[in-house]
Amino acid sequence: RQSLQPHIALFPTAGMGHLTPFLRVAAMLASYNVTVTVITAQPTLSAAESDTIASFFAIHPQIKRLDFHIVPYNSPTPDDPFFIHWEATNRSLHLLHPLISTSSPPLTAIFSDFGLATNMIPIADRLQIPTFILLTTSARFLSVMANYPFPELSDTDANHIQIPGLTNIPKSSIPPQLLRPDKSIFASTLASTVSSFSKVKGILLNSFEYFESETIIAFNNGQVQPGFPPVLPIGPIAPYGLVQGDHPLPWLNDQPAKSVVYISFGSRTAMSKDQIRALGDGLDRSGHRFLWVLKGNKVDKEDKEALDELLSNSFLERTKNKGIVVKGWVSQEDILQHPAVGGFVSHCGWNSVTEAALHGVPMLAWPLNGDQRINAGVVEKSGLGLWEREWGWAGEKLINEQEIAEKVKVIMEDEILRAKASNVGKEARKAVGKDGGSEKVLAQVINSLNP
Ligand code: BUP
């Protein structure tokens, strides 16, 4: 099984939040002269995923493409469509071995999404190659995962989950589906993944020492869990320069430096109509220019409502000279590095957080689901932004326009916050720059995989 260079297969689960970092790492590996195969589960759930996959392979012809056709799965209980897709992929994974066992040159490692790791490890074992998990969330959320299922809580610590070696985490930040006795797909996938952690060679983090030093150190000192695999910060994983979607850039080019607040809640979060209206009024009241990416439905193919069905004509008319609202895909990486952008209102999907970190853009963390409250804690602690904890999970309460306007003004006007965020940006760029911590870790991983 001799070959001249490593050959790594990468396999993300469904959702842009998973596909994006995998494609970025694939492009990075290819730039180190590694042979790379990207495996994607087909058909994809969202149009954003299929469009992105098509344009990625068009600009990276040297990267091998493996479309893995999954058997559809009808969940007996209602669940998030992205998690149903994960489950379908897991249930189809026994079909993968013959497709990759004859790869040329032979595979030397698999980088798996955590959601597929349990079923991927036996395949890698048969091929006698290591599995790495490429983590799509924060190291801090990994510390929650590593302690799941949570032990029975005594009365005294009923409001916190204990994380050995680190500060405890309030239950109010734990995704509610992990605290309920009924098992969602997310909860059961997590439970099985946790038992796989000890079998992987390493966990690659889209994070960097400065950003999550306490957590990374606690993991690598064995304090969070003895025998845990090394956690390997290689982030913030750099964009790979895909140009796609509706471009608000000509509009941004006409705005003064740092005058625009960018608002996006990621690829799979739609707010209630009332909350959308209050957010619009809050932006208007803040007095700042804005660029708002608006979603009306979790799955983009089903997002059919026009802008004027989600926002009133009077709002659109009133704000037409100072803000734009976009429905559809934008290139967030171009927006966050644009000089006109001075702040980012975000749901704190981990990719969005690391992208804001890379460019030092002050954030207003407005977490709504999943790992996002834990990620918001990282944003707050690192100085990258503000988090108003009382705003709760999605739909828990309606946040009114005045509260929103006040917070937007802070991230756009507070010079101390801006300086702290800018410092995070400097540290992030140092980490991925030449001889930076993350750059060195990635080079070491690649060297360790030389056949
Ligand atoms: Br929306 C949108 N353009 O219009 P997150 C998102 N993105 O480039 P999510 C665009 O998609 P999970 C758009 O830059 C980021 O890389 C954005 O990932 C990009 O959130 C990615 O931020 C979205 O992790 O995923 O989509 O909610 O739930 O897995 O966190």
Image: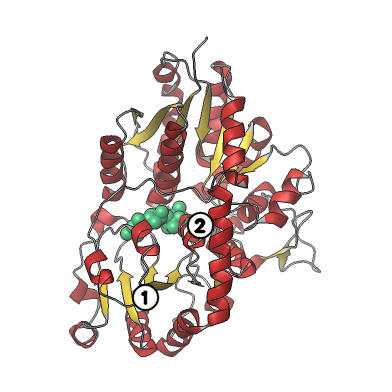
* Ligand 1 visible in quadrant: bottom left
Q: In the rendered view, does 401 fall on the left or right side of 229?
A: left
> What amino acid type should be assigned to the residue bearing mark 1?
Ala
Q: Which residue position holds label 1?
A: 257
Quadrant of the frame with the C terminus = top right
Which element is circle 2 on? helix
Query: On the picture, is 342 further left or further right than 317?
Result: right
Tell me: residue 27, above or below residue 431.
Answer: above
Picture quarter containing residue 288? bottom left
Q: For the residue carrying disc 2, how many other residues have a C-alpha within 10 Å: few (<14), some (14-19), or many (20+)?
A: many
The numbered dot on residue 432 is: none
Q: Residue at x 50, y 39 (%)?
A: 113
Q: Local crowd at mark 1 within 10 Å, few (<14), some, or many (≥20)?
A: few
Q: Position of residue 447 (x, y in %)?
A: 59, 27
Please tell me which of labels 2 and 1 falls first in the chain: 1
**Which numbered disc covers residue 354?**
2
Determine which quarter of the picture holds residue 92.
top left
Q: Is residue 187 above or below residue 419?
A: above
Task: Look at the picture and state if 9 lies above or below 292.
Answer: above
Position in image of residue 168 (x %, y %): 74, 63
Applied colour scheme: secondary structure
In the rendered image, residue 50, in percent from the top left (x then y), is placed at 28, 43
Q: Is residue 387 visible?
A: no
Residue depicted at x 76% and y 60%: 153
The residue depicted at 60 percent of the width and 47 percent of the height is 436
